[in-house]
């Protein structure tokens, strides 16, 4: 995140909780640097802020990326993740790491609200993990995404779009239209041809106009996407 903007918001609103993707952020596909991570933790201490580190895309990263939870040792950071993106959304198995007293309270809250989990799904995921299948599966997925990501980035650049930053992994590419064109208008035109695009305004709290688009490389197999961008934009 923009640390200066974050500090300004903390001073103005004094929030108690901050949610963030530090690894392969949605929608930009970028990851938080070590220096920025330390700055975020310093702000959390200064303003009494707790951080929920949503690492749902972290396993797509090919290396050991920086995690706030590791630096903070779960003092003010609550670490959450899931296998919904890497295995299947229908599996509905995830996990949380936090201070022991908070974990007990969250467990009580889960039981009180009736949010039960399927034991068989949890056991299936456990076996996948302990038998090493998950590691092998992710190695294959990361390799496939690396090839696809390079293809999509090359195609977008040929269409005149600018790439924010080439991601180290994952499925997202954040690209800007030439001449500050309105991405929402482009997405609307694309939808008329049954092409679904994610304009940048969808990722802004007040839906401000944006010239940025998020592309999921796993769903860019249809050449119509690039034909539209090449001809019209």
Image (cartoon, rainbow, N blue to C red):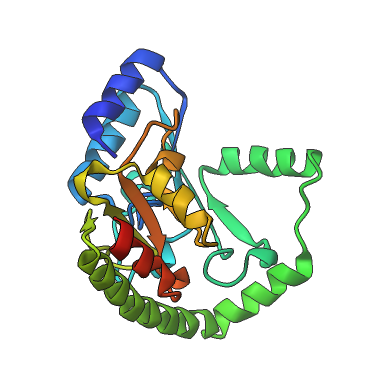
| Picture residue at 38% right of the left edge, 76% below the top | 145
In which image quadrant can residue 144 be found?
bottom left
Quadrant of the rendering where the N terminus is positioned: top left
Image point (24%, 33%), residue name: 3
- Measured from the top left, where is residue 72 in percent x and y? 34, 44
Could you tell me residue 77's position as x and y percent?
43, 41
Toward which corner of the image does residue 182 lie, by quadrant? Answer: top left
Instruction: Determine the image quadrant of residue 226.
Output: bottom left
Q: Residue at horizontal 56%, vertical 77%?
A: 129
In x, y percent, where is residue 121? 72, 70
Decide if residue 20 is in sight here: no
Question: In the displayed structure, would residue 143 be above or below residue 123?
Answer: below
Nearest to the observer: residue 73 or residue 151: 151
Is 161 placed left or right of 138 in the picture? Answer: left
**Residue 33, can we see it?**
yes
Q: Outermost residue, front direction? A: 231
**Measuring 65% from the left and 40% from the top, which residue is drawn there?**
106
């Amino acid at each position: 995140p923009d640390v200066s903007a974050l500090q300004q918001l903390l001073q103005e609103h004094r929030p108690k909780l901050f949610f963030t993707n530090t690894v392969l952020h949605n929608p930009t596909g970028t990851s938080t640097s070590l220096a920025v991570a330390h700055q975020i933790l310093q702000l959390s201490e200064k303003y009494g802020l707790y951080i929920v580190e949503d690492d749902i895309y972290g396993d797509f990263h090919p290396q050991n990326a920086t995690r706030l939870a590791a630096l903070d040792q779960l003092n003010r950071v609550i670490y959450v993740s899931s296998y919904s993106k890497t295995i299947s959304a229908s599996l509905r198995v995830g996990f949380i790491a936090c201070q022991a007293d908070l974990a007990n309270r969250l467990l009580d809250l889960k039981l009180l609200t009736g949010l039960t989990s399927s034991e068989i799904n949890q056991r299936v995921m456990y076996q996948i993990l302990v038998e090493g299948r998950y590691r092998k599966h992710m190695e294959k997925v990361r390799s496939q995404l690396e090839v696809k990501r390079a293809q999509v980035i090359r195609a977008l650049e040929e269409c005149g779009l600018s790439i924010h930053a080439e991601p180290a992994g994952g499925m997202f590419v954040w690209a800007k239209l030439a001449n500050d064109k309105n991405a929402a208008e482009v997405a609307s035109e694309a939808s008329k041809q049954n092409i679904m695009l994610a304009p940048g305004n969808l990722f802004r709290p007040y839906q401000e106009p944006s010239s940025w688009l998020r592309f999921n490389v796993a769903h860019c197999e249809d050449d119509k996407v690039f034909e539209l961008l090449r001809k019209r934009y």
